[in-house]
Image (cartoon, grey):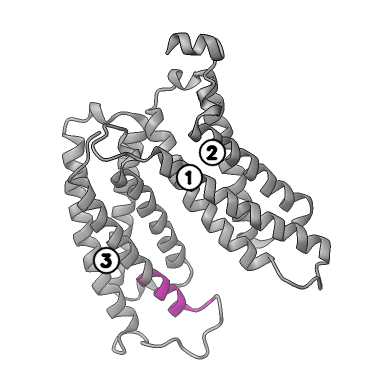
């Protein structure tokens, strides 16, 4: 490898960081990300919390991608006290989830077919930004596909299906928390507060697992990390099963809540809507933890 580096880019540069399939995907991420937020900032425009979130996603992902490309091209990542493989795999999965969210939200709230009242030029900029936002999601998903662990391959934990699912589980939990604080009336019953405790506990432990993997500190633990993660995943399945039963009962049973959306509920400010979102994503996360438990039996890292 030393001779290859000398012949291609010298001993201090790693040209594979920008010429390999993963490197090309990252260059496209940087290009599409910069193009997207530039179009929005120049003429497309954004407003309210939804627009701010989209701009944050595009600028954040752009900055971290530039950081990763720079570190790999110059070998600076070898000086960092983190597990680089775990960090890049975790970020690619997180960026995929964030970019698809922004790619859905921005056109949903800001794109329209007619020119009135924003003008045709602004409309065209917003449509172009939406297209590049979709392309940005595609290239982040491509990196996840290219760097994921192959069957039987010894690799970083975050590159395995179980590791990638941890990022998705935490992301789904954030959606649940967002719905909880949006007037979900979770303090109405103790049983609903139990569900909130389940969401919070599983989110915190999942984030801790990711943090230990990314920082490369798993070897310093006094207990076997791999076995502990599997045991926790099994516990999370049981906890989410309880929430998947309790939350719908206390929200949609006629004895405690409302089986149908109240007719007088204002759009965007209706507790029933938030409760429905929480119920749906509770089942989504339950499924993710079940799949995680199944795949964790086959991990080698």
Number of numbered discs: 3
Question: Looking at the rendered structure, which numbered label has been put on residue 296?
Answer: none
The answer to whether mark 3 and mark 1 are in CB contact below 8 A is no
Image quadrant in which the C terminus is located? top left
- Residue occupying image coordinates x 45% and y 18%: 79
In the image, is residue 26 part of the stretch drawn in magenta? no
In-front residue for pair 31/187: 31
The answer to whether mark 2 and mark 1 are in CB contact below 8 A is yes
Describe the element under mark 2 as helix, strand or loop. helix
Where 19 falls versus 285 (above or below)? above
Which mark is first along the chain, 1 or 3?
A: 1
Q: Position of residue 298 (x, y in %)?
A: 19, 43
User: According to the image, label 2 marks what residue?
Assistant: 25
What range of the chain is rendered magenta? Answer: 269-279
User: According to the image, label 1 marks what residue?
Assistant: 142
Res 69 → quadrant: top right
Report if residue 206 is visible in the image.
yes
In-front residue for pair 101/199: 101
Res 242 → quadrant: bottom left
Per the model, the C-alpha gap separating discs 3 and 2 is 43 Å
Q: Position of residue 35 (x, y in %)?
A: 69, 45
Report if residue 197 is visible in the image.
no
Describe the element under mark 3 as helix, strand or loop. helix
Image quadrant in which the N terminus is located? top left
- Residue occupying image coordinates x 38% and y 58%: 173
């Amino acid at each position: 490898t030393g001779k290859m580096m000398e012949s291609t880019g010298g001993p201090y540069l790693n040209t594979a960081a920008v010429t390999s399939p993963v490197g090309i995907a990252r260059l496209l991420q940087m290009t599409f990300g910069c193009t997207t937020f530039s179009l929005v900032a120049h003429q497309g425009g954004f407003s309210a919390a939804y627009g701010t979130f989209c701009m944050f996603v595009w600028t954040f992902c752009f900055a971290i991608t530039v950081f990763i490309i720079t570190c790999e091209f110059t070998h600076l990542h070898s000086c960092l006290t983190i597990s680089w493989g775990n960090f890049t795999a975790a970020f690619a999965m997180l960026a995929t989830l964030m970019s698809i969210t922004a790619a859905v939200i921005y056109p949903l709230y800001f794109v329209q077919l007619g020119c009135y009242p924003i003008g045709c030029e602004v409309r065209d900029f917003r449509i172009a930004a939406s297209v590049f936002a979709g392309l940005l999601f595609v290239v982040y998903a491509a990196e996840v596909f290219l760097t994921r662990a192959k069957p039987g391959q010894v690799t970083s934990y975050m590159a395995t299906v179980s590791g990638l699912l941890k990022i998705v589980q935490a992301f789904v939990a954030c959606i649940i928390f967002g719905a909880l604080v949006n007037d979900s009336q979770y303090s109405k019953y103790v049983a609903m507060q139990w569900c909130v405790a389940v969401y919070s506990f599983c989110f915190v432990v999942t984030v801790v697992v990711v943090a230990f993997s990314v920082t490369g500190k798993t070897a310093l633990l006094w207990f076997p990390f791999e076995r502990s993660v599997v045991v926790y995943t099994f516990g999370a399945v049981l906890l989410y099963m309880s929430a998947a039963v309790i939350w719908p009962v206390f929200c949609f049973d006629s004895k405690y809540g409302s089986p149908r959306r109240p007719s007088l509920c204002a759009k965007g400010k209706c507790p029933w809507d938030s409760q429905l979102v929480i119920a749906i994503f509770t089942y989504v996360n339950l499924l993710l933890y079940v799949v995680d438990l199944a795949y964790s039996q086959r991990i080698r890292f």
